[in-house]
Amino acid sequence: MKQLNFVIENATGLHARPAKVFVKTAKQFKADIRISHGSKKVNAKSLIAVLGLGVKHGGAVQVDLDGEDEELAAEALQTAVSAGLGEDDAAHKPVQKPAPQPIVANGKVKTAVPKLPKDGLAGIGAAPGVAIGPVFQLRQTALKLTNEFAGVDAEQAKLDEALAAGKAALHALQQQMQAHAPDEAAIFEVHQELLTDDDLLEAVQQKIQTRQNAGQAWRATIEERAAIMAALDDPLLAARAADIRDVGNRILKLLAGDGAANDVAWPDHPVVVIAHDLTPSDTATLDPKRVLGFATAVGGPTAHSAIIARALSLPAVVSVGDGLLKIGDGTAVILNGSSGIIQVNPDAAAQEKAKNELAAAKKQQQAAREQANEPAITLDNHRMEIAANIGGAADAVKANASGAEGVGLLRTEFLFLDRATPPTEDEQFEVYRQIAEAMEGKPVIIRTLDIGGDKPLPYVQVPPEENPFLGERGIRLCLNRPELLREQLRAILRAASYGSLRIMFPMVADMSEWRAAKAMVDEIRAELNAPELPVGIMIEIPAAAVMADVFAKEVDFFSIGTNDLTQYTLAMDRMHPTLAGKSDGLHPSVLRLIDATVKGAHAAGKWVGICGELGADPQATPILLGLGVDELSVSVPSIATVKAKIRTLTRTEAQKLAAQALACATAQEVRKLVGS
Ligand code: PEP
Ligand code: MG
């Protein structure tokens, strides 16, 4: 008898992929292996049972092993967990943020751009692009199962045959997706694993023993398991219920004699697909020659189907509401995957207009790229600085070549991810030096390590937290581990003479944190006899925005992290599968905090940048300009378009618009005010 205790460090806990690796490892051994979390104890060789534990990031689990190869099994599991359970390349990276969602909607016509015709519908834009064409509704056909029972052995044989065919189809799907979206392809590997789940198969067998036929037994078992998963108090894990149903349906179709999983009678012309929802395998099997784009009544922008749509470059709108399904087959629509707007029955002129707009947008992008190296100056001669958000030295080279006037945010956590130990001072120095040199003397803001919350590190143990986003993250974590921060500051200060470096602290809530961190900079600078350099803070906690006038007396600059500032102001988790789309940085509450920050900074002669996603949102540009923000730091591909947008604006008009936006009641009102 052997026992192991782990803390699960994977960013989203024991979710699909890490759970699959854990279970696969356990299955290689004969020993009886049980895993427990809280009051639940389950078979560690059953993927569904392990998922059902609902272990979140930082969750503690106990593993009990009993059998002749228990030692070997314990060692293998220990190694698998230490190696990140198959997520060494992804788990410890921050989970990808959903693209900024300009429109919050659920079935109602919303104030948006383009202006909605009477028959418009609005959802959440999930994959950019425009699709123009007739609608085709993908309907879930109810499968007819017979009551016939051919005998226990014959039913078991039917099930085995369907499982083998299902696995082969999933394997093919996984291979097909691999080239477009390797991360998403992994979901089909999880689906294959679900089909070998001991607990699940045992439960089906038991039902067959009680004279249910293979189809009935399979359907009942899948429903039981999906219901348990759906009831979990964790949206990410509860979403796995959809995967269980998806894979369950695939086998059910085979058992019902439907043959191929895709038995839809497609029209012979390209269509815009509408559906209540699309499973990952529905989306992955959409044929780009037949499908121009799709819209679903439910679903969120971070669901697997939305991510697959982006990978396949299929324009998509989700969460439109049930009104979507009232559109009859063959009805013409214009679907805009960026704004989330669907125009129903547009006349020929509107269709022509949409086509022309699409072509014009392409042309505009091209023109913006050609002027990327020119400064961003408004029509009334006000210059705004446009810098880049980068994650490492390679990005710096691209940023410099793409017209960036500096680096507004270097997310240094990328140097700390994907490794078992922190980078040494020398390794860090080398990277900071390379970035300073690549930017050829332009300012480079190096943000000190921002981990915790959504960004755990394997070698920095943070005790399990109920609310990691409200826990030990950013500067709080670094001040509690001064050696980590000290090494990083030494590396930055040593690299300072190779360019124009600045230091920025993340997640500052309180003056005492700023003062402690700044004191450390001063101490190390004196030790190294390094040049003086500007030191600032991120404004991403409402407390810091409200106190900006006080901070401004001591800091050299502010950069507003609108991703976190929005999350904390609206109390909406920035990665929440359904709320993330509603968490809009143009909410007047967030704008008022930006306004307070700019006023506080300017009164003390300090400057303010924006480094959150809002900086690249075209509807936000005039408002941020009008509020007096001095710099926008955006992802490298957005530099040219943000600059081009500023060249179309006047500062005086933008100031009027900003004043009106501050007086709005909702984010939708602000977006309506701005227009395109
Ligand atoms: C932000 O919060 O807006 C920000 C830029 O920081 P990060 O996205 O890295 O948390
Ligand atoms: Mg942040």
Image (cartoon, rainbow, N blue to C red):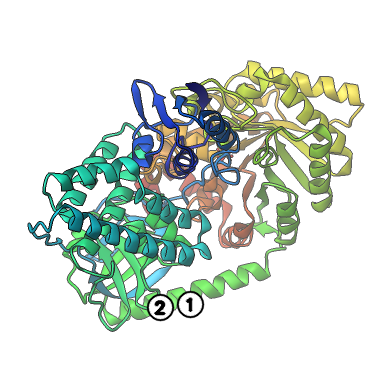
Q: What element carries label 1?
A: helix
Residue 394 screen position, x and y as percent? 73, 54
Relative to 61, say whether 321 is above or below: below
Give amino acid for label 1: Ala
Q: In which quarter of the image is residue 601?
A: top right
Q: Quadrant of residue 354?
A: bottom left
Say which residue appears at 32% left-offset and 31% top-offset.
233
Residue 329 screen position, x and y as percent? 19, 73
Residue pushed farthest right? 529
Say which residue appears at 49% left-offset and 25% top-offset.
470
Q: How far apart are marks 2 and 1 (CA)?
A: 6 Å
Residue closer to the observer: 413 or 28 = 28
Q: Is mark 2 on a helix, strand or loop?
A: helix
Residue closer to the observer: 575 or 110 = 575
Q: Circles 2 and 1: CB distance less than 8 Å?
A: yes
The C terminus sits in image quarter: bottom left
Is the residue marked by circle 2 packed among few (<14), some (14-19), or many (20+) residues within 10 Å?
A: some
Relative to 461, say whether 597 is above or below: below
- What residue is shown with label 1? 359
Give amino acid for label 2: Lys
Residue pushed farthest bottom? 268
- What residue is shown with label 2? 355
Residue pushed farthest left? 147
Say which residue appears at 31% left-offset and 71% top-offset.
272
Q: Does the beta carbon of the residue at mark 1 sit less than 8 Å from ligand 1? A: no
Residue 98 screen position, x and y as percent? 46, 48
Q: How many numbered discs, if any?
A: 2
Is the residue marked by circle 1 packed among few (<14), some (14-19), or many (20+) residues within 10 Å?
A: few
